[in-house]
């Protein structure tokens, strides 16, 4: 018969069974058979056969049954290509009928035999014949009486006696499972888990080990590690007189596997079976090169292995399991590196909402910075600071954040904004400092004046109410769900060192403050790829001299303000150089529109009026006059360097003086200075001449020499196209893919959050292009820039410092385009290191 239908195959060590034809479970069972484990006799039906069954074309059922000893009970289980896609539920005890019942009654006793028969009638009725479940679920008694009731209910509902013929039973089970797989609901469900439209289903027909009867009988699961931590620990449950996975629902009655203070165990009850199972699991770990969970049945003291699946695991457990397998030389270090999903590392770096916790979602937005935190709602940065001073964790809720909010963000445990996208202010700062953040929660109501936050379903949350921001899921939750802590332990560092050994593209961090730099070092970034110097002015008491500088209406006033800023900047840079200990530090000169630093509320205007000793009305007028229609395309970036050159002069001087100071106390420093928003080669020439002059002056004054390199941010389309000219004046080019994406699409990075979800849902964009680099459009500009830049200057160093530098798919693009290093927020550095390593293996 096998020749007629090669897809109906007895599972032996040599049978032609593969995952793409018979599914994962069939393949795994074959491996267990090869290992000589006590697996009950099994027949595998391939995808083609099952598909034909769904169409009504049954294989030779008699031939299948002839594979099994007479009157054996059978079970059917699904075997899809990827077991995570799910599949129809198993059906057990097929073949049960009056005759089998009579025979079993003599062998295993009346109670056990009638319990088995009753179970089968019920599951056949509900899952195969699709009769009304209520009629069966209300049967309370088990045993002979329950059996009689079930048979009667079947006959009433189906208008025929319960089918006695094993062939018909099996045929109907196979047909019902095959059809269930092809139904629309099941297809949508598995497609959501990544299954292709035409994913196939295999089925396994297996002889039952009964689990009910005389002597010790039962079923359970066993694994050798804890699924949450990955630490070695025999875990699982066992239930006497049970079948399938009943032990997992068995509540109090189920036993622990290993001896346990919480209750009785299989080890106490049946030590020999326990030992045997442990040995099988260890053997499987060695031979199948993975931690496996065994599904087993004990029949009168004898162990049967029904199935083996890879143990379910948290991200933390996945990492530890991979490391331990490599340390035990079961897999190579490269394989260990490949076994952990890069994105999953973010779960280890931050606190998370416990996956088992109840979630009361009150709003959704862009998952802008991962991790979760719980706190009381505050609506302003001042309140956030006051709350932090009282030692009360708070969530800062804003329409959007601006430089003025940075102190508030530092004081808060999480941030929620109404506006914004992946690269808006709150998102960038949040990721930089590891602060959970959800932005663009447009369906929630933000009523700052009433100090009120409205949930999407209309519930009202006031200042002081407790909410949780889940920046990994992009959700806002009411109350304080249970959390799990970050886990940066030795295993993590060992694992990452293995990844680094494979990697062939550099990973630096975007770090603006000493604290960021320390985080970057902690996560083993290979330097700083972008220090956004404007962020340094949001700290402490700097905003006032900064505002005075912007406000100055004569060069003399401006010089005075800059003179106050110089020592602050010098100290910042010295500190960064000291922390980075000779690693490269790339400092970007001032970039944002100046007016971003000016106050926008009455209290701020008044403070500024006091500082510059002018009436509020005048200050207000000037602030208004500095406003721009389109600030992101206005007076910012290198345009400031051309029109207000004193700012860049001051910054260059601070960098050079810090270089000399830091080199005196530690490793020699060669700073990298970077110009933002360049669009014309001439901009670079002009600014470079001034910076060279500042360097010459500092060398002269200090009587000491130093080196530095000057580079250009390529973040306008024109800079990509003119990269050949520009590269002739630059030691390095760094693609600022945030602005480059904004300008290539003509898509505001601060407003895209409003419609991005519509765009992605309707398939206009496959993904938010601020999140995953658009390889086709923006990517083409980058390839042009790389090619032209290198052609004109073979030694030019190339990098990407937009937020895409921390996104695995985008890193793959960068590597293929020939980029030397990527730079991303410190908390994304480990993800980038692992993603880059996997690309090189
Ligand atoms: C960029 O535009 O990609 C970039 C890194 O600079 P910023 O995000 O500060 O504009
Ligand atoms: Mg930019």
Image (cartoon, helix red, strand yellow):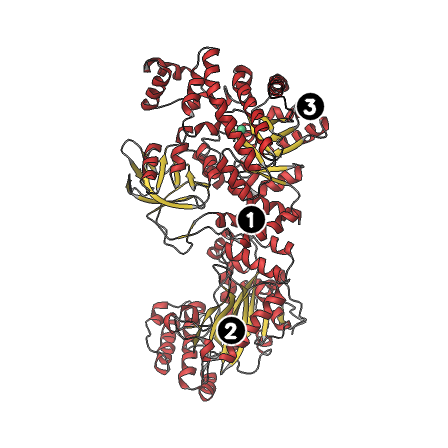
Figure quadrant of residue 127: bottom left
Report the Cα–Cα distance between label 1 and label 3.
37 Å
Q: Is the distance from the Cβ of mark 1 to the nearest ligand 1 atom less than 8 Å?
A: no
Please name the residue that numbered disc 3 is placed on.
728
In the rendered structure, the answer to whether residue 730 lies left or right of residue 431 reads right
- Quarter of the image with the N terminus in it: bottom right
> Local crowd at mark 3 within 10 Å, few (<14), some, or many (≥20)?
some
Nearest to viewer (mark 1 / mark 2): 1
Q: Earlier in the sequence, mark 1 or mark 2?
A: 2
Q: Is residue 191 visible?
A: yes
Q: Nearer the viewer, residue 160 or 812?
A: 812
Q: Nearer the viewer, residue 357 or 211?
A: 357
Figure quadrant of residue 55: bottom right
> Local crowd at mark 2 within 10 Å, few (<14), some, or many (≥20)?
many
Q: Earlier in the sequence, mark 1 or mark 3?
A: 1
Q: Secondary structure at mark 1?
A: helix
Q: Nearer the viewer, residue 117 or 754?
A: 754
Q: Position of residue 143 (x, y in %)?
A: 37, 81
In the rendered structure, the answer to whether residue 789 lies left or right of residue 645 reads right
In the rendered structure, the answer to whether residue 113 lies left or right of residue 735 reads left
Q: Are marks 1 and 2 in contact (CB under 8 Å)?
A: no
In the rendered structure, the answer to whether residue 490 lies left or right of residue 783 reads left
Nearest to viewer (mark 1 / mark 3): 3
């Amino acid at each position: 018969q096998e020749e007629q239908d090669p897809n109906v195959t007895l599972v032996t060590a040599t049978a032609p069974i593969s995952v793409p034809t018979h599914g994962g479970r069939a393949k795994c069972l074959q491996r267990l058979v090869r290992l000589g484990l006590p697996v009950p006799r099994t027949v595998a039906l391939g995808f083609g056969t099952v598909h034909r069954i769904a169409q009504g074309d049954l294989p030779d059922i008699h031939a299948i049954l002839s594979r099994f000893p007479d009157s054996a009970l059978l079970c059917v289980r699904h075997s899809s290509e990827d077991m995570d896609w799910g599949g129809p539920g198993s059906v057990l005890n097929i073949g049960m009928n009056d005759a089998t019942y009579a025979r079993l009654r003599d062998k295993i006793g009346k109670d056990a035999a009638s319990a088995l028969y009753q179970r089968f009638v019920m599951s056949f009725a509900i899952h195969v014949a699709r009769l009304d479940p209520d009629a069966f679920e209300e049967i309370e008694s088990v045993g002979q009486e329950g059996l009689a009731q079930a048979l009667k209910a079947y006959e009433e509902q189906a208008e025929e006696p319960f089918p006695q013929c094993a062939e018909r039973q099996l045929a109907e089970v196979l047909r019902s499972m095959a059809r269930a797989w092809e139904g629309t609901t099941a297809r949508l469900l598995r497609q959501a888990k990544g299954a292709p439209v035409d994913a196939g289903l295999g089925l396994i027909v297996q002889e039952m080990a009964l689990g009910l009867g005389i002597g010790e009988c039962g079923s359970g699961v066993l694994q050798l590690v804890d699924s949450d931590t990955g630490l070695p620990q025999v875990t699982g449950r066992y239930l006497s007189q049970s079948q399938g996975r009943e032990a997992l629902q068995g509540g109090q009655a189920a036993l622990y596997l290993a001896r346990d203070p919480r209750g009785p165990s299989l080890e106490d009850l049946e030590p020999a079976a326990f030992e045997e199972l442990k040995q099988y699991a260890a053997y499987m770990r060695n031979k199948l090169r993975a931690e496996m969970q065994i599904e087993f049945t004990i029949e009168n003291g004898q162990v049967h292995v029904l199935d083996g699946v890879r143990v379910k695991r948290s991200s933390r457990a996945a990492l530890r399991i991979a490391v331990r397998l490599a340390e035990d030389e079961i897999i190579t270090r490269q394989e260990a590196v490949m076994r952990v999903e890069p994105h999953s590392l973010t779960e280890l770096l931050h606190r998370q909402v416990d996956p088992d916790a109840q979630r009361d979602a009150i709003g959704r937005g862009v998952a802008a910075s991962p991790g979760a935190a719980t706190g009381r709602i505050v609506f302003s940065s001042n309140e956030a600071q006051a709350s932090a001073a009282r030692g009360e964790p708070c969530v800062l809720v804003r329409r959007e954040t601006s430089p003025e909010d940075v102190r508030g963000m530092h004081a808060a445990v999480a941030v929620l904004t109404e506006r914004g996208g992946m690269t808006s202010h709150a998102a960038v700062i949040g990721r930089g400092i590891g602060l959970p953040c959800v932005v663009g929660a447009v369906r929630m109501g933000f009523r700052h004046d009433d100090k009120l936050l409205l949930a999407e379903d209309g519930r009202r949350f006031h200042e002081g109410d407790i909410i949780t921001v889940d920046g990994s899921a992009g959700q806002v939750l009411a109350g304080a769900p249970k959390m799990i802590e970050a886990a940066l332990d030795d295993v993590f560092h060992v694992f990452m060192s293995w990844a680094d050994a494979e990697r062939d593209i550099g990973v630096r961090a975007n770090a603006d403050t000493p604290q960021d730099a320390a985080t970057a070092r902690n996560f083993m970034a290979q330097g700083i790829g972008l220090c956004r110097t404007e962020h340094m002015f949001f700290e402490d008491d700097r905003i006032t001299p900064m505002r005075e500088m912007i406000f100055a209406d004569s060069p003399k006033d401006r010089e005075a303000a800059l003179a106050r800023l110089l020592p602050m900047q010098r100290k910042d840079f010295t500190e960064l150089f000291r922390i980075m200990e000779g690693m490269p530090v790339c400092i970007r000169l001032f970039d944002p529109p100046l007016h971003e630093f000016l106050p926008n509320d009455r209290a701020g205007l008044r403070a500024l009026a006091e500082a510059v000793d002018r009436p509020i009305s005048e200050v207000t007028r000037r602030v208004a006059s500095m406003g721009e229609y389109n600030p992101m395309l206005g007076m910012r970036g290198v345009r400031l360097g051309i029109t207000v050159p004193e700012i860049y002069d001051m910054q260059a001087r601070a960098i050079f003086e810090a270089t000399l100071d830091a080199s005196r106390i530690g490793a020699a420093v060669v700073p990298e200075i970077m110009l933002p928003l360049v669009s014309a080669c001439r901009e670079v020439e002009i600014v470079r001449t001034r910076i060279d002059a500042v360097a010459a002056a500092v060398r002269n004054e200090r009587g000491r020499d130093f080196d530095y390199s000057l580079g250009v941010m390529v973040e306008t389309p024109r800079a990509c196209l003119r990269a050949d000219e520009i590269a002739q004046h630059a030691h390095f080019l760094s693609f600022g893919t945030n602005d480059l994406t904004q300008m290539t699409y003509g898509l505001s990075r601060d407003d895209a959050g409003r419609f991005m979800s519509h765009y992605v849902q309707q398939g206009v964009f496959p993904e938010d292009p601020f999140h995953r680099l658009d390889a086709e459009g923006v990517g083409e500009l980058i390839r042009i820039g790389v090619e032209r830049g290198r052609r004109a200057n073979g030694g030019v160093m190339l990098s990407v410092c937009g937020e895409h530098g921390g996104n695995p798919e985008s890193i793959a693009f960068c590597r293929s385009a020939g980029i030397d290093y990527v730079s991303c927020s410190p908390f994304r550095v480990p993800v980038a290191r692992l993603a880059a390593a996997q690309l090189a293996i």
